[in-house]
Image (spheres, helix red, strand yellow):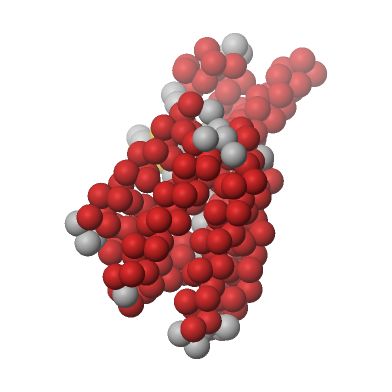
Amino acid sequence: MAGGARNRVEDIMRRMETALLDGTWPVGTRLPAERVLADQYAVARNTIREAIQRLAARGLLQSRRGAGVYVTDQLRTGIASPWGQLVADHPALRDDILEFRRVLEGATAYFAAMRADASDLKRIRALLKELERSRKDDDKLGEADADARLHDAIALASHNTMFLHLHTSVIGMLREHITINGTGLRQAAEESSDLLLRQHRTLCEAILARRPEEARTAMQTHIDFVRSKVDGDGA
């Protein structure tokens, strides 16, 4: 491959890697067709094809015959793979997880309030409405699912690649823990469901109003509440 062509492929790879890191292409996303990507990046289709092949060779993308090219979970499992079993085997780690979440998600909420764009704010509003609707319908599983996805949306809205990567690789991998934790609190008492909803509403309002310090405090207050309930249950 000539030097110019090689440089073009490497440049496209870097740009595609950025899309993988910054949340443009989340895990499971089907990439646009080669011709669409070629138009988007203003290069020939064979350049796109070569870049995809290289990323696939590294396990970041996967070609499925007749179905297209998809984003794998390689970035997530590359950091977090041992933790799933450790958490399953050592419930006492839950407090460490919540302590980590307090720091990381406090920061993501802070930067989300500063940097969220129109699509981020629309997504956060929609998920808050979904959370409120599930609460009204007394749908505990629906609440927990909307809760987890709302935290994902806030991480995405932080527009910080490192925060998003840590959230996706560690918090995302622990989604089962988060969902079970949230569901458990909601099933334990109706008042917990009401408090959790109020906490998420306060958090979202601070982000939507672009008040970073209030957003961070609201997130930390929420995590502290969850942590106190877990500790209170002897976990």
Q: Nearer the viewer, residue 117 or 213?
A: 213
Pick out the residue farthest to the left: 137
Q: Is residue 165 visible?
A: no
Nearest the viewer among 69 and 177 is: 177
Quarter that holds the N terminus: top right
Q: Nearer the viewer, residue 65 or 109?
A: 109
Spot the residue most to the bottom.
Answer: 234
Q: Where 234 falls versus 154 (above or below)?
A: below
Between 52 and 167, the residue placed more toward the observer is: 167
- Asked whether, in this view, residue 42 is left or right of residue 9, the answer is left
Q: Residue at x 60, y 54 (%)?
A: 217
Residue at 55% from the left image edge and 55% from the top image edge:
219
Instruction: Tell me residue 129's x, y (percent).
Output: 32, 44
Q: Find residue 213 and report its horizontal and vertical position in percent.
A: 64, 46
In the image, residue 106 above or below residue 193: above
The x and y percentages for residue 157 are: 55, 38
Judge whether residue 135 can be spotted in this image.
yes
**Is 38 left or right of 28, judged from the image as shown?**
right
Q: Going by the picture, which residue comes out furthest to the right? A: 3
Measured as percent of width and height from the top left, residue 147 is found at 40, 55
Q: Is residue 87 above or below residue 209?
A: below
Q: Residue at x 80, y 18 (%)?
A: 3
